Structure formats: C-alpha cells, structure tokens
Image (tube, rainbow, N blue to C red):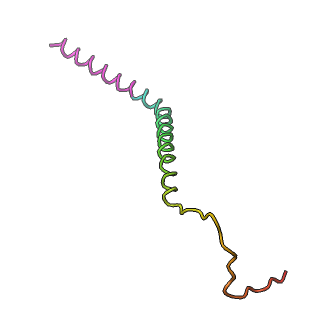
Amino acid sequence: MQKVFNLFATLGFVMSASMVVGSLLLYTRIPSLTKYYMSELKLELTKLVTDMVPAKIDDVMPELPTATGPVIEPAFELPKSPF
C-alpha cells in the first residue's frame, strides 16, 4: 500500500511541477504570441478592407460630367470687396 501512496505522491509532484513549468513558459511567451497574432490579424483586416473599399466607392460615386455649361449668374448682387 505504501508503494501506491508513494506513486501518487510522485505523480502529484510531477503534475504540479509540469504545471509550474508550463505556466512560466506560457507567461514568458505571451508577448511574442500576442504580437504575432495581432500582426496576422492586422494583415488580414487590411486585405479585407482594401478589397471592400473600391467596390463600395464605385457604387456610391456619381458619374463625372463630360461637359460643363456656362457660368451661372448669382441671384443677388455680391458686396464689393474693400481690398
């Protein structure tokens, strides 16, 4: 029976030690992982937005005129500039 308890104690220590080591490794690598995933996310969002924007702008923009008319006279007299 003592061997079973010693085995459980050893397994408990190994599990605790592996949890501590895993937590430390993850804690030290979080900044680089975050930086990597943020750069990937920015790249994907940039591609998505650049693909969407030209199509949306073309849909909204009116056609530019090919010819223009004469100057429109103002409906009222403009004040003279003192300069």
Q: Quadrant of the C terminus?
A: bottom right
Horizontal relation, residue 76 to residue 51: left or right: right
**Magenta region, main secondary structure:** helix
Horizontal relation, residue 36 to residue 74: left or right: left
Residue drawn 35% across the image and 26% down it:
19
Q: Residue furthest left?
A: 1
In which quarter of the view is residue 62 placed?
A: bottom right
Verify whether residue 3 appears in magenta.
yes
64 above or below 33? below
Q: x%, y% of residue 28?
A: 47, 30
Magenta extent: 1-22
Q: Residue furthest top?
A: 3
Residue drawn 60% across the image and 65% down it:
65
Q: Residue furthest bottom?
A: 76
Label count reads 0
Viewer-proximal residue, 23 or 80? 80
Q: x%, y% of residue 57?
A: 52, 56
54 above or below 79? above
Q: x%, y% of residue 55?
A: 49, 52
Viewer-proximal residue, 36 or 64? 64
Q: Quadrant of the N terminus?
A: top left
Residue drawn 38% across the image and 26% down it:
20
Q: x%, y% of residue 64?
A: 59, 62
Viewer-proximal residue, 78 or 6? 78
Verify whether residue 27 appears in magenta.
no
Q: Residue furthest right?
A: 83
Horizontal relation, residue 5 to residue 45: left or right: left
Viewer-proximal residue, 45 or 51? 51
